[in-house]
Image (spheres, rainbow, N blue to C red):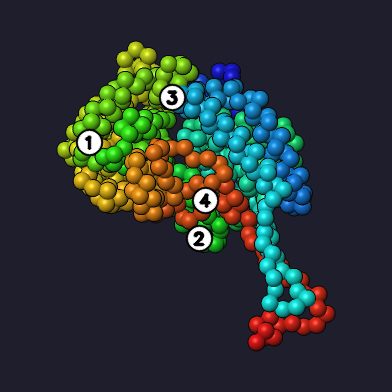
Amino acid sequence: MSKEQVYKNFIGGEWVESRTGRTFENRNPANTEELIGVFQKSDRRDVEKAVATAKKAYETWRLIPAPKRAEIIFRAAHRLVEQKEQFAREMTCEMGKVLAETRGDVQEAIDMSFYMAGEGRRMYGQTTPSELPSKFQMSMRMPLGVCAMITPWNFPMAIPSWKIMPALVCGNTVVIKPATDTPLSAINLVKTLDECGLPRGVLNLVTGSGSEVGDPLMTHPDVKVVSFTGSTDVGRAVSEACAPQFKHCHLEMGGKNVIIVMDDAKLDLAVDGAIWGGFGTTGQRCTASSRIVVHKRAYKEFIKMFVERAKKLRVGNGLNPEVEMGPSINESQLNTVQNYVKIGRKEGADLLCGGNRLTKGVYSKGWFHEPTVFGDVNRKMRIAREEIFGPVVSVIPCNSFDEAIEIGNSVDYGLSSAIYTQDVNRAFNAMRDMYTGIFYVNASTIGAEVHLPFGGTKNTGNGHREAGTAALDVFSEWKSVYIDYSGKLQRAQIDNN
């Protein structure tokens, strides 16, 4: 990875400079003196070229049999396996999370690629008996056309793979705008698919800001679906931009996820889950365990164990094998974390550990913050309701199982939730009553796998799901087909009295 490497847009199978002639730098959040690369600062003209190219490529790509499309994705999966370590190290440098996690990020792209390659030989429809004689009926998926994808920085290869692979296997073409904080990982994924034989124009990548690339991409009349992962506020704007054209819109947005710890929980296991859920990826996950609701009979012991573990977490450069938590992605996100710490203090929560930016020694050139735990948090406090996207965990005491469920469901989001208990009845009741798209028993709120649907309720999403076969629904339309071989007019319900 050269310090002077200039990366280009990928349009029509070629790496090309932006029409603007402008670029932007991407720097390591653990050491801002380290330049990751220089990327294209694109605008509407680049978007229009990419969409026109994708539209033209769709004419032939949609006609390639799905199993053949899938073979390219299958080859890409194997190629990602070969380059996993390189891509993981580059990802750690550009977004900060520890190497074990970036290896997992690349692995998720590998898993999704293998999974969706398999769908090329399935992609099942339905066949049903007709109510009339000599008549056959079935359903089948149709591709949509050009798909626009706007992806975040926290999973810079995994999330693009969640969108790109199902879109391609369904027969669509793609224009992706990766996050400006992490364009390199998306470029690595696109380059891999290109090397594995993806036809020109089928997959295109344009880097740049949301206003100059994202906005014209999602409003372009030739874009048939927009798949967005990011904040709820931006997601609302995406939905509004798609509405006038009735453009398909898939939104995956924020979370304020809860772990419920009951009085019969194995506390060692619960603390393990709370540490991983709260501070994995520096809390910069939509599934982060930012709320821990603990039964009052277990509260004191849990707090003692949890705070002790949080204080011992090693913070630093993610390439260091001894480091357990990396930096915030950028200065703005670090400032958000610091502001919420101030809010928590002002609201009267008990700051049990952390609360400060790390600035001395190895921390002086990066965006580091201490793992932070607030205790005796009231469910109505902002730190207990609003997504912080940083290493800040609120611990909320409760008096009963019913109260825990009530607290868990009291926020505007509904992505992931979990319960730690040895009571199977409580586990199943919580499974039924928590209104979230993902639920765990005796595990953290982190840990989704690619073969089940991923997504949430309320302000987390708009009803669609990523991963699993549910992802195919985002990037395809159903067509019902009726074949009458009776040789005469049959009028369905009229002739079926």
**Among numbered discs 3 and 4, the one appearing first in the sequence:** 3
Disc 1 crowd rating (10 Å Cα; few below 14, some 14-19, many 20+) is many
Under mark 2, the amino acid is Ala
Q: Please indicate, yes or no, whether residue 438 appears anywhere in the rendered image.
A: yes
Instruction: Return the residue at label 4.
Output: 465
Number of the front mark, 1 or 2? 1
- Distance between the alpha carbons at the discs numbered 1 and 3: 36 Å
- Distance between the alpha carbons at the discs numbered 4 and 2: 19 Å
Does 180 appear above or below 242?
above
Does 150 appear above or below 316?
below
In depth, the one of 123 and 63 nearer the eye is: 123
Task: Check residue 29 in the rendering and tell me which mark sits there, or answer none.
Answer: 3
Q: Position of residue 317 (x, y in %)?
A: 43, 19
Disc 2 crowd rating (10 Å Cα; few below 14, some 14-19, many 20+) is few
Task: Check residue 339 in the rendering and tell me which mark sits there, or answer none.
Answer: none
**Among numbered discs 1 and 2, the one appearing first in the sequence:** 2
Q: Position of residue 48 (x, y in %)?
A: 62, 47
Q: Are marks 3 and 2 in contact (CB under 8 Å)?
A: no
Q: Secondary structure at mark 3?
A: loop
**Which residue is pictured at 43% across the width and 37% down the height?**
446
Q: Secondary structure at mark 4?
A: loop
- Distance between the alpha carbons at the discs numbered 1 and 2: 47 Å
